[in-house]
Image (cartoon, helix red, strand yellow):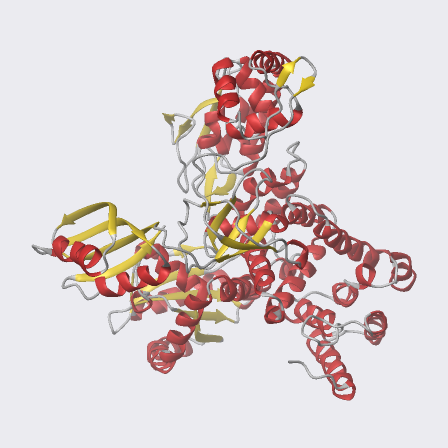
Amino acid sequence: MYHFDSETEKKEILSRYRYLMKVWLPKKEEDRKVVRKAFNMALEAHKDMRRQSGEPYIYHPLEVAIICAQEIGLGMTSVICALLHDVVEDTEFTLEDISGLFGDEVTSIIDGLTKINEIFDQKTASIQAENFRKILLTLSHDVRVILIKLADRLHNLRTLDALLEEKQLKVASETIYLYAPLAHRLGLHAIKTEMEDLAMKYTEPEIFDAISNKLKESEQERIRFINKFINPIRQSMNDQGFKFSISGREKSIASIWEKMKHKEVTFEEVFDVFAIRIILDSSLESEKADCWTAYSIVTDIYRPNMERLRDWISIPKANGYEALHTTVMSYTGQWVEIQIRSKRMDEIAEKGYAAHWKYKDSIKVSSQLDRWLDRIKEMLDSPENDALSFIDDIKGYFFLDEISIFTPQGELRTLPAGSSVLDFAYAIHSEIGNTCIGAKVDKKLVPINTELKNGQQIEIITSSRQSPREEWLDYVVTTRARSNIKQSIKEHKRKFRALGEENLVGWFEKSSIEPTAENMKLFQSVNNFTSLTDLYYAASQDKIGIKDVKAFASANMKSGWLTFLTKPGVKTKPKEVVSPAKKKEIAVQASTIAGGHEGDKGNVGFEVALCCNPIPGDEVIGLVASDHLPIQIHRTKCPRAIELMSSFGNKMVKIQWANRESISFIAGIKVAGIDRIGILHDISGVISAELNLNIKSFSLNAEDGYTEGEFKLFVEDVQTLNRLLMNLREVDGVRKVTRVD
């Protein structure tokens, strides 16, 4: 509970302002005066406002300004904009007021920030998608808008405890899905890492706390190991006259959890819980050579794993990251990751895009990042105007690793890992992509769906008779390729729209269905067409016909959702709406999250999402896709749920399981261990005899003394499932038991 004390608050506000001045370090007294003027304006504008925690609102813009100055390294203009970023949106001050006091540059950035928030407040089906698209649109205007927005989001995450649980989930999910990847792509490693950890604290609190506690428990042992490991390296580098710092850094909780999931190991089995970082104080001219010399010193002392050498000095990552990474074997038989970089490289690694400007005149370090920003601008200029499709396309582009490919002329092109020949063709030119029929990879002829590898040389082969097809979307990973393919296919399908619509209207009338827009939409949804254009195209190509329409009419005869023709132009009275047959209904309590108010509670129809199979006792969230369709239930930690909460925050409902009679749900478990005679008998005994659970299906594979199996079971709630997992771990030979989706 926050306690109000005006004198204490005044001292705290002044203390935070002084700290801002300390971390920003203004170069001129004039700059200090301008920032003081911005602070006074923000103080006056927010004087009667408080945050959800009860604290004065001015704390927030001050903290955002501190993040901009200290953690991103932005200058005076950004500090002013951070202090004033909520003034136009939340108070009576206008852009004209700001323009008169601070000029056009500050006004333009604050206008960009305000427009983002205005989009965010709209009640559209995809608020967050529209918001994110708007943020990216500012790239063509001023990248500082995005950097300040990321600082704003980081401080909101740091103070998320004050919000309701459902709001915490929404903000955390949106951060994981959109903001952390954007911070990563702009090179803001420290901010991206903290965002992921803070978001995980709310989406997966039990796992977050468990890993956090494990890190604390092993901290002293880890410190002793690191000190012993780095001593010989420090000694050798001192002997050779290097100026440097060396330390061990803990990996983030989110990254440790990702490794545990990906490798299916326990915390104790994750070998790179920390990394050793060597930062060299070298000149621009000698930094690369010094990094390789440091690498040589390390590998003289410890044996390296050559498969894990990563050279991002010769070819930096697309976000500008430069470093040497290697993994070496320690004296205890433990693999240890070592990162080697110069002070300049370290500053760029931590502060990202903002740090590039400091060195841009002396070295071309930002060319990779500038090319990425140019590609983003190309995507934004794409004719694809559906925000959700845009987000789907661009999302995967943020976190992918890169590969370097050469043209026949020796020009280097960077593409996301997993790119195909077709991706490379579209990266050169959209027309080359549209007419691509194959390629020569290192002089060898290959098809268009061939996945490219690092360092290959590609020559694209084209034909004027070639045109994009829908299966091409399965061959590409880049947004540029997907956008061009989709646009070409759309243009082709539009030519058949009139014919398809005419066919469909005729089939509707012959089946006594009124061809209204609502009926067409329902038919489109039932038959899983993403748009009416796709539906009409299918109707024009005989991919659907009157049989499908009659089956649709028959299935919905009593639903009340369709309007039927008694004679042309006359409707029958709609019947009472009931849930479709075969839709399972059980009692849940649902309350609407959108707008922060609760909706009607009671029994509602729902569908259990197959991607995560929630069961009673799981923390769950619901999505209201349509007034006519059941609520779709996901576990809150389900990746699909995180995506949905990011894109459809206003369609989301918080679900609580109601007390009711027993209903069985399907759950999956994976069991692994040492193979022996009778292990399956003992496992099934625990499932069936001890806990009286039914097995729906199972598969078991034994090889070289190791056995692994997956079981699908009917369980009543998460408590029963947890008891089963605990009991199975006691079976002789079983080494690992996990729940699977």
Residue 368 visible in this rendered orientation of the protein: yes
Q: From what the image shows, is residue 355 above or below residue 30?
A: above
Q: Is residue 498 left or right of residue 141?
A: left
Hey, which quadrant is residue 270 in on the image?
bottom left
> Residue 356: x and y, percent?
63, 58
> Residue 23: x and y, percent?
68, 76
Judging depth in this view, the residue of 456 and 22 nearest the camera is 22
At a point 41% along the width and 29% down the height, the residue shown is 449
Direction left: furthest residue: 677
Hey, which quadrant is residue 393 in on the image?
top right
Q: In this view, does 415 lie to the left or right of 565?
A: left
Residue 408 visible in this rendered orientation of the protein: no
> Residue 666: x and y, percent?
34, 48
Judging depth in this view, the residue of 79 and 87 nearest the camera is 87
Quadrant of image for the N terminus? bottom right
The mark total stands at 0
Hey, which quadrant is residue 511 in on the image?
top right
Direction bottom: furthest residue: 7
Q: From what the image shows, is residue 633 above or below residue 273?
A: above
At a point 81% along the width and 64% down the height, the residue shown is 87
Judging depth in this view, the residue of 427 and 395 nearest the camera is 395
Q: Is residue 172 left or right of residue 14?
A: left
> Residue 451: x and y, percent?
40, 35
Q: From what the image shows, is residue 629 above or below residue 152?
A: above
At a point 64% along the width and 22% down the height, the residue shown is 572
